[in-house]
Image (cartoon, rainbow, N blue to C red):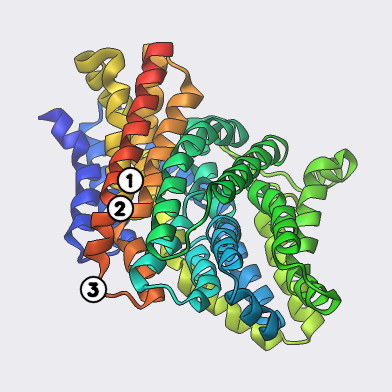
Amino acid sequence: MTYLLWSLPALTVIAAIASGRVNTTIAAVLGLFAAVPIALYAAPAPFGGAQLAVTLERGLWIGWIITPYILGGLLFWQMASQGAAPAPAAAGHAELNDPLARRRRLFFACFLIGPFAESATGFGVGMLGTVLLIRPLGLKPRDIMVFALLSQILIPWGAMGSGTLLASAYARVPAPQLALYSMVAVALLMVVWMILFWRTARHAGLRADAAEHRREAVWMAASLGLLTAATAVLGPETALLAAYGPLIVLRFLLDRRPDRAQAAAAARRALPYILVIACLVATRLIPGVNRTLAALADFRPFADLPAWLPFLHAGSWLIAGALAMAAWQRRPGALAVQARASWNTGRHAVMSVFLFAMMAEVLAGAGISQAYADGLFAAFQDWTILITPVLAGAFGILANSGNAPNSLFMPSQLSLAVQAGLNVPAAAALLHVSGTAMGIFSPVRMSIAAGLAHGQGQERSVYVLLLPFALAAFGILLSLALLVVVSG
């Protein structure tokens, strides 16, 4: 009965989201309201008002660290997008007449532009970028929906890596290390996503020969390799932007062979991203710049949680970039409009981050996460980790986010890994990728894809098509869980 009571916050969130009647923010509020009295009156260790206040402060601090990534990325993207010059139309029409060019445009949209846009902003903007590029190809709505969902495959780096940073705070694992361990699962899952892409492209009439398939596989492998290196050097916040920015330019030049006017127009559209990526990379890689900016301000209220260095925070640079664009364009009114739009788009994500972080810290601070992990470990021993992909994946599908499963299950996952003597970063990465990667099958994300593709009413047929790939993805994650247990 005690374990059921301790499970009540998670069960409350699951039931609220599964009902379809409330959004993630309300579900998080209900979960927090359930967690507080349970922590105060049913915790396995003494837990009073003073400890509750500290845990809530810790959750607020985690939310404060993550929020600038979300809102800053949205504001910068919208300011850069509204000032972009339109692409030359003639080049686009010429491209649509070439079957090979159509196929390459599809790959470019799904695996480069989509993930780049999602990394800069999150919130399905990657799907929007992908759909805008492939809509002129004249594909059926069902196929467009699948291609739109493929833009979400690198979601651990989405929204400036905010989800990975949050998971690292819960797991007490450095964010670059967690992201690098996550790359193993992401790379294996990429095999599933590439097969899905090839199958759907063939069904859509955009066939390719074996040589083009090999070219796409090489591009994907090179992209993941460069992303891995950038993550190791820069961390997950800016890694995908820094890795994919040059790849997008190179692919554009190779595929489109633009003349001088077309290249100049593309450069003008990309200039804001080039400048902000250059600044972010400089703050990470130039030791003198890094030390100087770090010394200007350094806030560390909790020794075991991430610090806030405002002059090194990627969110601060994104906000500064948006302010610079408004000043350059002499349109302060546009900045206010886009700031309101960014808040309207991102407010539920921001509020849910704060609420889930507070709930996770309350459960961990009260000892409930540890005690729950102890009970599971006593029942299943090392094999408890095998439950992770199913729990986190199912919850990620329901919540359309990895933040909820990370906040609910990461403290227990950490305790389980320590007790069993397992690789802690690997166990944390397994939970993180399971919760984030399976979100591609979320009903929320599916509804966004259907709206963008004008495919309302076709969601069920798309789910039928995706079911074998979802099962394959779960199989890979379960195999990785088994490997974590066996390797110790």
Q: Is residue 414 left or right of residue 336?
A: left
Q: Is residue 162 left or right of residue 450?
A: right
At 66% from the left and 39% from the top, the residue drawn is 231
Please identify the quarter of the rendering in which residue 349 is found.
bottom left
Q: Is residue 421 among the parts visible in the rendering?
A: no
At 54% from the left and 48% from the top, the residue drawn is 213
Q: Which mark is residue 469?
A: 1
Given the image, on which type of amino acid does mark 2 rest? Leu
Please identify the quarter of the rendering in which residue 394 is found.
top left
State the quadrant of the N terminus.
Answer: top left
Q: Is residue 275 among the parts visible in the rendering?
A: yes
Q: Is residue 341 above or below residue 194?
A: below
Given the image, on which type of amino acid does mark 3 rest? Gly
Q: Position of residue 260 (x, y in %)?
A: 86, 75
Q: Residues within 10 Å of mark 1 (few under 14, many from 20)?
A: some
Distance of label 2 from label 3 (alpha carbons): 16 Å
Q: Which residue is mark 2?
A: 466
Quick one: 175 or 241, which is closer to the camera?
241
Q: Is disc 3 placed on a helix, strand or loop?
A: loop
At 47% from the left and 46% from the top, the residue drawn is 57
Given the image, on which type of amino acid does mark 1 rest? Phe
Distance of label 2 from label 1 (alpha carbons): 5 Å
Q: Position of residue 98 (x, y in %)?
A: 60, 71
Q: Which mark is residue 73?
A: none
Q: Which mark is residue 457?
A: 3
Q: Residues within 10 Å of mark 2 (few under 14, many from 20)?
A: some
State the quadrant of the C terminus.
Answer: top left
Q: Earlier in the sequence, mark 1 or mark 3?
A: 3
Q: Is disc 1 placed on a helix, strand or loop?
A: helix
Residues marked 2 and 1 touching at CB (< 8 Å): yes
